[in-house]
Amino acid sequence: MKPLGGSNMNKLSKLALSCSVGFLFFFSLNVVSQEVEEVVVTATKKAESVQDLALSIQAFTAEDVSENMIENMSDLAEVVPGLIMDKGIGSGAAYSIRGTGSYGVGAAVVGAVVTASNGHSYNSSSIADIGFFDVERVEVLKGPQGTLFGRNAVAGVINMITARPTAEAGGYVEVEAGNLALAKTNMHYNLPITDSIRTRLAFTSKKRDGVTENINTGNMFNDVDSWGARLSMDVDIGDDSTLKFTYETYESDDNRNNIGTSFCEPHPLYGCSPFTLGTPNTAADSRGSTAALFNLIGALNFTADKNSYEGAAVVDTFKKANLNREPVHQQTADFATVEFNHEINDEWSMVAKYSYATRDYFHMNDNDYSVAVQPFPGINPNNWNTYVMVRLFWWRGLWFL
């Protein structure tokens, strides 16, 4: 065999260069031929293309919400980098964007992320449960937005824009069924009353059997039974003014958990070891938490050196739990808004808004996620020796240990 000469090498190099140039030219034409979809958002309180805004914003159209199966805030956190949403003990929900947020839940806690519906501030816990139905768009603004959305928008804003009534009558009904007796319904219907008055009714419901077994009672829990409805009305006042009214209600009555399963490696000093993840459905060692002190002060135990959960059954699966009783989850939420828009000219507009919300929430949960093996002995007046001994040590100002 003869080695390739210089001329042959030059020919191969020219051929490779020609192929590369041709491929790049074809690829460039293909990219140019693709149209970039324009998404119009209202992040700055007026309709603008998301490409024209110097903001870090992610917008999901109704089609995006459906294709990505974004039903609620938890699903939204799965597709938005830097967004975290967690349910808290009680009725709260905590949000963070880019690592900044308020994880406490209470009247004295100021949130760092504003949740809104059509630009109206919406209770963060209510909107977490209601989810997204019949929406036109969902916008997530990252970074401080206090200029337009108030002091709570330190980390960002999550704004849900609901679909508005149209001038044409019609709608759709979507029904979904699955295992565990799952039944979901989504529908909307547009009903124009006159040329200047348009209405829209949207409805959603979801039912599902329980997915978790309580090995202590043998019952199934973590089911879903909820529904929501929204009535929207747009009234044109002249050529330049529109009055928008929106009212929605949501109800749920089931026995789902408010937060997920806790993981714990019992530790006599820390309660749960901060160094290891541990197993799910495991209660903290009662000797290593403030529970030991309060049990002693309340005379529920005669010693702080006692772990009430020692030997308790542990199930290391999400499909089972060991609880004293199943949780109870009941909620009714109402949210009404009125918005007046007046176009002054091509550059200026006047917007006046008012919103009113109520929420009735009840949730009971076994927050230690276990069943104590050793009951509280308490103070038994029939046991005179124990009773006198405890009172004697209290009288001396000492604790009986």
Image: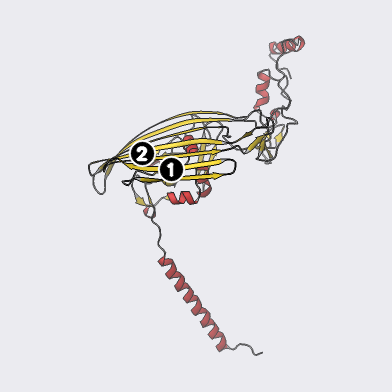
Q: Quadrant of the C terminus?
A: top right
Relative side of 207 to 357, left or right: right
Quarter of the image for residue 364 reads: top right
- For residue 187, the mark is 1
The numbered mark, 2 or 1, whose residue comes first in the sequence reads 1
The answer for how far apart the CA atoms under marks 2 and 1 are is: 14 Å
Residue 177 at x, y percent in the picture? 54, 44
Q: Quadrant of residue 162?
A: top left
Q: In terms of depth relative to the viewer, which is nearer, 234 or 53?
A: 234
Outermost residue to the left: 238
Tell me where residue 203 appears, x and y as whole percent: 43, 39
Relative to 321, does residue 173 appear above or below in the rendering? below
Q: Residue at x 65, y 27 (%)?
A: 290
Q: Nearer the viewer, mark 2 or mark 1?
A: 1
- Eyeballing the image, is 46 above or below 8? above
Q: Amino acid at mark 1?
A: Met
Residue 61 visible in the snapshot:
no
Residue 263 or residue 312, whichever sits in front: 312
Disc 2 marks which amino acid? Answer: Ser
Q: Secondary structure at mark 1?
A: strand
In the visual, does 121 lie left or right of 68? Answer: left
Q: Residues within 10 Å of mark 2 (few under 14, many from 20)?
A: many
Q: Which residue is mark 2?
A: 232
The picture places residue 125, in percent across and down from the top left corner, at 49, 35
